[in-house]
Image (tube, rainbow, N blue to C red):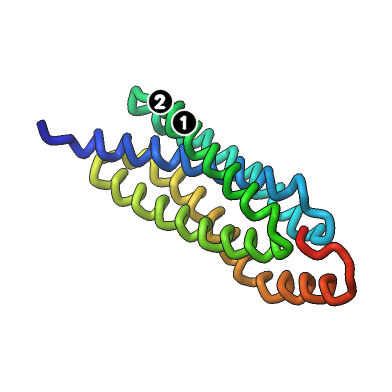
Amino acid sequence: MPETIHDIYATGLVNARAVETQAIQLLSRQVERLESYPEMEAVLRRHITESEQQRDRLDQLLESLGTSNSSVKDMVTGLMANMAAIGHAVMPDEVIKNSLANYAFEHFEIATYNSLLTLADLAGHAAAEASLKQSLAEEQRMAQWCEDHLDATTRRYVQLRVSGEKAGV
């Protein structure tokens, strides 16, 4: 039996919610360890709050469709995020690896919200547009911050490393 546009859209929302759960877990593990990068810590904490709000907005959209999130998907993506954070934590260049991963992940989220906007349009769910565009703008802003600060983060890491100070986080 073929899926309806509504079903495909609802699945997209469920998947996006799981991605936000993953983002929250990933960033939460990172900020727990940041010591030498206070500006990054502040920005990541702000984005965790934004991601929680994005997850709430997705919950509201799902509820408006008469459905809800997938606890299994949330659990799996949360576990993946924690495993990624653990994998980076043992590396001396953890902050660089996290910076690269965050930049890539933000672009994944941007693509997710762009796709959801198309799905909402196809499903005739015009009420979702403002919410999805707000989340998209937040992800674009965070991706831009990641790009704008990669040079400074790399330079700070090298400066700390060559001076013998703790540089990874």
User: Which residue type does callout 1 highlight?
Assistant: Asp
Q: In x, y percent, where is residue 55?
A: 52, 37
Give residue 85's position: percent from left, percent from top.
Answer: 63, 49
What element does badge 2 sit on? loop
The answer to whether 64 is drawn above or below residue 114 in the figure is above
Q: Residue 53 sits in which quadrant? A: top right
Q: Quadrant of residue 11?
A: top left
Residue at 69% in and 52% down: 89
Q: Which mark is residue 97?
A: none
Q: Residue 126: percent from the left, percent from the top?
A: 33, 42
The structure residue drawn at horizontal position 34% and vertical position 52%, both measured from the top left corner, is 115
Considering every residue shown, the one lying at the far left of the view is 1
Toward the top, the furthest residue is 66
Q: Amino acid at mark 2?
A: Ser
Horizontal relation, residue 21 to residue 42: left or right: left
Per the model, the C-alpha gap separating discs 2 and 1 is: 7 Å
Residue 157 appears at what percent x and percent y? 77, 70
Instruction: Give the residue at x 64% y 55%.
Output: 88
- Categorize mark 1 by other alpha carbons within 10 Å: few (<14), some (14-19), many (20+): some
Residue at which label 2 appears? 68
Q: Is residue 135 above or below residue 17?
A: below
Q: Quadrant of the C terminus?
A: bottom right
SS assignment at label 1:
helix
Q: Residue at x 41, y 33 (%)?
A: 61
Read off the residue under disc 1: 59
In this rendered view, identify the residue nearer to me: 166 or 6.
166
Where 23 sits versus 62, above or below? below
66 or 1, nearer to the observer = 1
Contact (Cβ within 8 Å) of mark 2 with mark 1: yes
Looking at the figure, which quarter contains the N terminus? top left
